[in-house]
Amino acid sequence: MPLFDAHTHWNGTWNADRHNPADWLAVWDRHGIARGAVCPLVGLLRDDQLAADNRDVAAACARSGGRMLPFCSVNPSAGPDAVAELGRLAKDLPLAGVKFHPWLQGASLSTPTMDELCELAGGHRLPVLVHDGTPPFSLPSQVALLARRHPRTTFLLGHCGIFEHWREAIDSMRFAENLWGCLCSPYPAAVRELLRRVDLCRLLWGSDHGFGPRDRIGYHLHVLDQAGLTDAQRSAILWDNPRTLFRLG
């Protein structure tokens, strides 16, 4: 069965040509990953690099033969400039979604600008991937409240609460029907509980590949193995659900 990695971050250090995804795709091939969502990285850490990072992600994805789906980001702290920039990116780039990392970007989810950005994303049918599991700006419940305010926009918890807040992720997904969850970081017992209490059709899997050490994919796949997924659950989470979310036909 082909696999879909719904949470990765493009890292230009993978190749001397920062727009060449060959080494990246070689890692995917080693793990059987056919396609995946690719978010910025450096731009989440440095606002002055965000515009260039968005361009780099789009350029690398364009050379992947359709396997890498580009996400972009803007910093909501920029106010109207962020809204204008997202509107331009949505028009000029073949985006698959928008990524926010409120904890790194120092941006609250409870601002008028964030509301404008989420409405704009929804208007372009772009899912919004939000880092979660890190207080004070990135708790699952905060993302759930944002999702309830914007019912026409699809939201995705980037980590389903990580280690400490997965119970809150469960309650958040039950609270907001347009909130999906990415199984990227919860330990096996937490994954089993998420599978038991959350709509299977709104769960995906991701590795955070590119954010830290070179190959995190094997570890995160091993977590799923330890959780004891059925074949039907694996098929839904690792392939069918992301194809639905990203309208891949």
Image (spheres, rainbow, N blue to C red):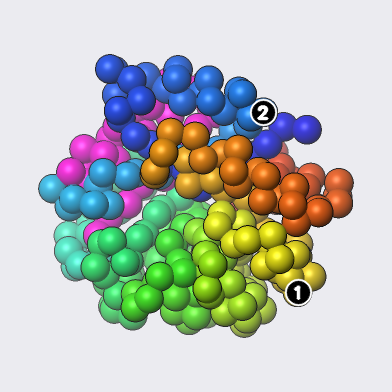
Disc 2: which residue: 32
Which image quadrant: the C terminus?
A: top right
Residue plotted at (86% across, 51% down): 230
Q: Position of residue 11 (x, y in %)?
A: 34, 34
Which image quadrant: the N terminus?
A: top right
Residue plotted at (46% across, 50% down): 97
69 over 115 or under it: above or below? above
- Camera-side residue: 31 or 91? 31
Name the residue furthest left. 48
Could you tell me the amino acid type at mark 1? Answer: Arg
Q: Position of residue 93 (x, y in %)?
A: 36, 38
- Camera-side residue: 137 or 218? 218
Residue plotted at (33% across, 20% down): 15
Q: What segment carries the magenta color?
A: 49-75
Label 2: which secondary element: loop
Label 2 Cα crowd, 10 Å radius (few <14 / some 14-19 / many 20+): few
**Left or right position of 210 against 245:** left
Disc 1: which residue: 197
> Can you tell which quarter of the image residue 29 is in?
top right
Cα separation, mark 2 vs mark 1, equals: 28 Å
Q: Position of residue 53 (x, y in %)?
A: 26, 39
**Res. 149 in view:** no
Residue plotted at (57% across, 28% down): 28
Name the residue furthest right. 231
Label 1: which secondary element: helix
